[in-house]
Amino acid sequence: MSRFWSDHLARLTPYVPGEQPADSGLLKLNTNEHPYGPSPLALEAIRAATDERLRLYPDPESTALSQAIAAQNGVSIRQVLVGNGSDEILAHVFNGLFLREKRPLLMPDISYGFYPTYCRLFDVPFEWVPLAQDFRIRVADYLAPRPIAPAGIILANPNAPTGLALGLDDIAAIAAGNPDTAVVIDEAYVDFGAQSAVSLLAAHPNLVVLQTLSKSRALAGLRVGFAIASPDIIAGLVRVKNSFNSYPLDRLAQAGALASINDTAYFEQTRRAVIDARTRLSADLAALGFEVLPSQANFVFARHKVRPGKYLAAALREQKILVRHFDAPRIADYLRITVGTPDECARLIAALSAIINSAS
Ligand SMILES: *Cc1c(COP(=O)(O)O)cnc(C)c1O
């Protein structure tokens, strides 16, 4: 606390991201980064954009990149907004769509930790909707009549940290059942096995789809995310963006992201490699006595039948392997493990096997 702080700062609970260690000898399976690098064409485009043009401000609308995203998704450019990571777009969504008098935002009790953080920052009232015992989203919970319509519903699909995905029929039902509510689908992990709700946008103008280049495009360090929604929702988000930072993407990010979006072959090859490694990792964990949720993401969420999650995470850290453990209700027994290369997964399994078999 400082006497110079704004009044609301004491109320904030800042998001705590997974560790980014300086020690490069650590195996990072804790923040869902892609184990393979970005498209070589993206790196080439960033190098080619690195010249004296950096004295100029970048295109404030990231037109070429937005156009490529629109074309790839079969929507108009007026339905696309790019931002400095999807976390920034999320901030614009909270600010621009969810501040509706006292109407609450609904979200699962187990989901991405940034959602309640933004609620506190923007003073959005929210209600946690408990997931079922098996961590599935119960669609009926989002259709039940309420005294006041929610201001918004936000769902990560696949959900984090569970990795479980919702089908498009379920998303359509939630959107149709809440026609006066913005329904935001955070598709950070969609490319690893779920279906995108972009195809539902024409029929459901209250849907907002968020995607990022951080996970499936291996560009977490470049900070690029985007929203796809109806033109009037995007126009609202653009108003927020231009009231906050009119140049969210620098020149290098625009160049690299555009080349990455256009390199479909590399994208398909590397995402397939992660999906295949996930299948193997899930089976190997099960063989060690883990219960592994069926993941559609680039991580698995697993609980050992004997060893607590916190213990395993600490023991792995001693072996220089980082995984994510959440000391939170319902999930404290679990580990969230990012899918690495086959070699990295093998190193993890060997370490876990030694820990589990040696401990008394
Ligand atoms: C990683 C992640 C994000 C943030 O992505 P950035 O584009 O890197 O800001 C958003 N939502 C979920 C669920 C994520 O896991």
Image (cartoon, rainbow, N blue to C red):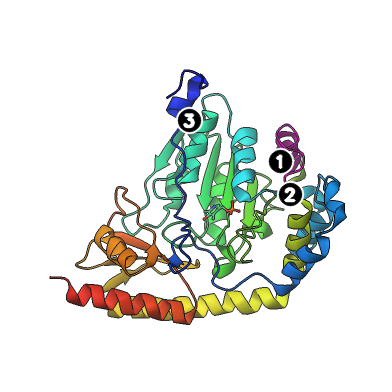
SS of the residue under disc 3: loop
**Left or right of 263: which side holds 347?**
left
Q: Between disc 2 and disc 3, whose residue precedes?
A: 3
x and y percent of residue 320 in the render?
Answer: 37, 68
Q: Residue at coordinates 47% horizontally, 50% vertically from top-left?
A: 17
Left or right of residue 54: residue 273:
left
Badge 1 crowding class, 10 Å Cα cut-off, few under 14, some 14 to 19, many 20 or more, is: many
The quarter of the image holding the N terminus is top left
Residue 346 screen position, x and y as percent: 39, 81
Per the rendering, the mark at residue 88 is none
Residue position for label 1: 233
Q: Label 1: state its secondary structure.
A: helix
Mark before the other along the chain sequence, 3 or 1 = 3
Sequence-wise first label, 1 or 2: 1
Q: Is residue 246 magenta?
A: yes
Tell me if residue 234 can be seen: yes
- Rounded to the nearest angstrom, the CA distance separating label 2 from label 3 is 30 Å
- Is residue 206 left or right of 1 when viewed as pictured? right
Which residue corresponds to mark 3?
125
Disc 2 element = loop
Quadrant for residue 263, please give it: bottom right
On screen, 28 above or below 118?
A: below
Q: What is the distance, in whole Å, between disc 3 and disc 1 at their CAs?
A: 21 Å
User: Percent from the top left, x then y, of residue 51?
Assistant: 84, 58
**Mark 3 CB near ligand 1 (8 Å cut):** no
Q: Which residues are magenta?
A: 232-249
Residue ID at (64%, 60%): 213
Q: Position of residue 175 (x, y in %)?
A: 58, 48
Q: Which mark lies nearer to you, 1 or 2?
A: 2
Look at the numbered disc 1 and say if its residue's Cβ is closer than 8 Å to ligand 1.
no
Label of residue 249 in the image = 2
Toward the left, the furthest residue is 360
